[in-house]
Image (cartoon, rainbow, N blue to C red):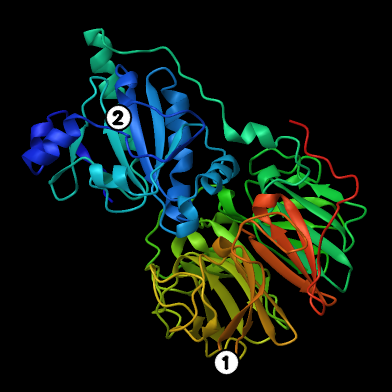
Amino acid sequence: MAILSQLTLATALLASPAAAQEAAKPSLDGAIGWINSGPIDLASLKGKVVLLDFWTYCCINCHHILPDLEKLEKKYKNELVVIGVHSGKFDAERNTENIRRKVAEYRIKHPVANDAEMVIWERFNIRSWPSRVLIAPDGNVVVVRNELGEPTIAIGGEGNYEFFDHAIGELADKARKAGTLNEKPITFATEESQYSDKALLFPGKILADAKSSRLFISDTGHNRIVVADLDGKNPVVIGDGGAGLVDGDFTKARFNRQQGMCLEGDVLYVADTENHAIRAVDLKAKTVSTVVGDGKQADRDPRETFVGPGKKSRISSPWDVIQLPGSRRIYIAMAGTHQIYAYDPDSGDVRTFAGSGYENIQDGLPAAARFAQPSGLATDGENLYVADSEVSGVRVISGIPEGKAKVGRVVGEGLFKFGDRDGKGPAEVRLQHCLGLAYSDGVLYIADTYNNKIKACDPKTATVTTFLGDVKSGDSDDPPRFHELGGLSAAGGKLYVADTNNHKIKVVDLASRKVHSLEISGLKPPTP
């Protein structure tokens, strides 16, 4: 969306008298739960500038504006109160406890209302995630004009930091001159503080390497990589636990909510998600370097084919990385632009490989195909499988070794076609926001994340069956229960699971289906 302008406080500019009347009396009534605070009456915040952020935790575009919100909260700590309104897309996202964990994982420090029944969403006439609404210190909703010159109260999409910075400053200055601004800071007890003692914190992805008998854990919440043997012994920590983009030795390097990994010899490539970068970890030299990205999100139009030198190019929320046997090329699940990218270590170039940049599901030639927040990758040696999370689907890219790549699908039908149903093919099978994949002995295992299940797929017939889990979120080995598992990796007849919301790694014996929680011997949380 273009930068907005023509800030006005006149509610009369709204499209209808009914809308104007509703906007004049903004309310958060209808929330079924609250995180980081008790229920909030907007009338109690009179004298403050209030920014409502309508979001859903699966949405990568919602992730992208969190740094902007944090910057605004710091800059206007005395004048501004941000309130998240979580209006969930998926069934799992309407559960307050699930939202509570995501608020902690994403380090959100402002109050969040669970608008599970979309009551607040409808009250403010919201139509997309993310959307933001400003409320002036006098308690009235702020009306702006969009790029078409139309009056609106809901500002949709990413970006527009400069607009909000200007608007909040202007609203605060006007109230300050009128003597109506409340500049007493308001603080909230945050969810993330209760997890400080976890040895692993929201691990997002995992990589098991049978050849070297090593296990690589993306300890996402702690901004670090943990390397151990396959039994969880002799752990080595990469990163000091602080969030940032810092190269150097293992004790000084920093990541920012990194996710997927792939191994080439003694170099571990890492999708450093919140840094919008690809990192290379030299396991022998014990150093970390950045090979793609500079820590800032790409702002170019994703629909334009891109190629450029990795170290000077910007990318957007890489979620997983993988190599196909016989090639050094690294494929990147670029969740932020709904595409697959490719990085060539020899040339150092990064480029668009597949996906038009439009968010949806569409098969065909790479340039025309559509993905929706690809978040996990796996290979059978020839084909590249993609966990296409926002369409709750599994995609396949065939013909890569022959230079005749084509995008197809195993399951998945659309952005709002999701559920929990086994069967054969896209018409029958339903998943719910799958994030991870692993391939072993002809079976493609799917982390059916929001269904708290592992599903087994025969990619040749597109037949999908429940392998482990019973929908209920939980933390038990017998019966096996998971809580929004994010990553899978297979090695030596075992399936390793990043059980994200349980802060654990679980190991599945593929023959017996027995599960045990892996103890990482001697691992401790990073020093604050």
Question: Does residue 205 lie above or below 295 as drawn?
Answer: below
Say left or right for 359 vs 1: right
How far is disc 1 from disc 2 in space, using C-alphas? 56 Å
Estimate the x, y position of residue 457 in percent, counting from the top left. 62, 82
Rendered position, 376 above or below 114:
below
Tell me which label, 1 or 2, sits earlier in the chain. 2
Q: Residue at x 63, y 60 (%)?
A: 486
Which mark, residue 166? 2
- The answer to whether any part of residue 161 appears in the image is no
Residue type, numbered disc 1: Thr
Q: Position of residue 33 (x, y in %)?
A: 45, 38
Question: Which quarter of the figure has residue 468?
Answer: bottom right
Amino acid on which the number 2 mark rests in the picture: His
**Farthest residue in the right direction?**
234
Position in image of residue 330 (x %, y %): 64, 71
In percent of the image, x 51 and y 66: which residue is there?
432
